[in-house]
Image (cartoon, rainbow, N blue to C red):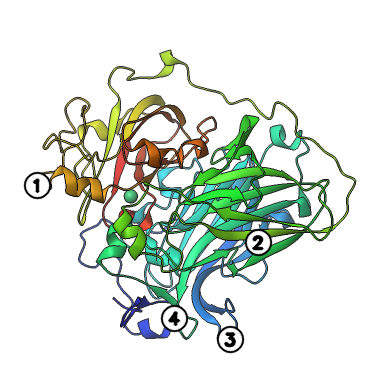
Amino acid sequence: MAGFHRLSRRGFLLGACAAAVGAPAAYGQGHAMRRIAPNRASDSFNPDVELELICKCDVKSILTGRPTRVWCYIGNLIKGPQNALTELPDTYLGPLLRFAAGQKVRIRLRNELPEATITHWHGLHVPMLMDGHPTTAIDPGETYVYEFEIRNRAGMYFYHPHTHEKTATQVYRGLAGAIIVEDEEERALGLPSGEFEIPLVIQDRSFDGDNQLAYGGDMHTSMFGFYGDRVLVNGRCNFAFDVASRPYRLRILNGSNARIYKLCWDDRTPLTVIGVDGGLLEQPETRPYVMLAPAERVDLLVDFGGRRQGSQMTMLSGEFYGLIPPMAQRMMGGDLAMGEEFPLFTAKVTRASSDTWKPPEKLSTIRRLRREQIANLDDPIPIAITMAGMAMLLNGRPYGHDDIQPRERIPVDTAQLIEIFSARGDAGMGHMGMMGGRMMRGGMGMGGMGMGGGMMGMMSMAHPIHLHGQQFEIIERSFDGDENAYDSIRHGFIDSGLKDTVLVAPGERLRIVKPFSDFKGRFMYHCHNLEHEDAGMMREFSVE
Ligand SMILES: [Cu+2]
């Protein structure tokens, strides 16, 4: 593995560009994968916004002392409004991109890394060749030109690499950024904006004694995902910001590889949720806490009005159980075990404000699909999640390009009912790989791995499942498992909005309805625990 140094205890040390010089890892080395030539700019496409994103090696000051070698997106605005591209201060994160619904956007992605890469615009509804499909990865020195129209509702989206088997390490090294889409419906609400709208990207990282990124590239990392021992928000440790005593909009993205957060205020002030992955909810919802799995977003209104100057509120990740095997929970993340309480960021009230804006009772209208619009009401498409040791499978199969199964072929411009369910501790054997048949009911097979129920229960963990393309509705969530553990997370799922990523806890069974409109081609669906994704917990739909 070019660019990785084996460390004695910590696993791999990351970020060294120089170490990789001389032997850039050719894309798809050892994997027969078709490559699609880099897309070029089209003369007939007249962009409203044009920008350049360069993926390159850099150094950033993250901890005191030595700067950290990172990989990052450097942005340049070529055409369009100034707010289309905003650099966040002092961070390795890519610039905040701000688009408006209906805009035509051209992005020139240049690869100056020592290995192949490609960028995915997580949550945006774009054609396959604009989606960062792994077959479109570009080699060092190449440029890929994206051209697409913003068809999404207002919301917060996420750009990051989607390189075959290298998504986890490329994101970990720093390649990630947030996208905000605006539209007229949202603008009319007069939500807090400008300095009162704060994007917050939460990630976890580990550092070695030399302040360099450390990555546990061992078997446990592949199995459970990477868990760092420090929380970074917008690329910074101990993140804090000053606020006035008035309402704010906090737009939070979990940009971590694997870590799941349980957002709650330290003084137990309830959270006011106004939006999720695919934009605004219809009405604000009040929750004691919100679960946020990798790639999920949540849009919060926080009213600091009435709080005295000098006071502060800290967002925590609260205590929870049942989303990762207890054995792994103790083993991963060092002092920051997943499910234990730790701080994420702090808002400090430093000045008074008389602004007493209140959110409207109705935020938006979500156009929901009617039953008669669903093509397969009696025969949902299964997404069965199996994790058996190193085998990360969906519907009993690892990722394979050109391995489209009958149930993965979807007619364009249809809406499909999809059932997602995780491995069950008391599962029977067999039934896996029966993609062509009916729904796999009554528990999960183990893909012939021959592990007993006890072992399997120990191995159960939650998986954030992401489907590319349009957002979906969650229409049903049922649970059969450890109720006590489930009680520590169940009030934190916001299922009323449109989603592109959904956390599936062990023992849960979800039904979602997803449209497959406008674009034919291959669209990925996968676990957004990035180590799981890279280990093969990914498949694709062929929209035909
Ligand atoms: Cu997973």
Residue 421 falls in which quadrant of the image?
top left
Label 2 sits on residue: 78
Tell me what residue is drawn at x 11 percent, y 48 percent.
Answer: 449
Is disc 4 surrounded by few (<14), some (14 to 19) or many (20+) residues within 10 Å? Answer: some
**Figure check: 23 above or below 424:** below
Label 3 SS: loop
Amino acid type, mark 1: Gly
Residue ID for mark 1: 450
Left/right placement of residue 16 relative to residue 306 reads left
Most foreground residue, 275 or 514: 275
Q: Which residue is mark 4?
A: 208
Identify the amino acid type marked 4.
Asp
Q: In the drawing, does residue 64 fall left or right of residue 24? A: right
Name the mark nearer the viewer: 1 or 2. Answer: 1
Q: Looking at the picture, how far across and down is residue 157, in whole percent?
A: 55, 48
Instruction: Check the picture and name the quadrant holding the C terminus.
Output: top left
Q: Position of residue 299 (x, y in %)?
A: 62, 43
Q: CA distance from mark 3 to mark 2?
A: 35 Å
Which is more toward the observer, 272 or 525?
Answer: 272
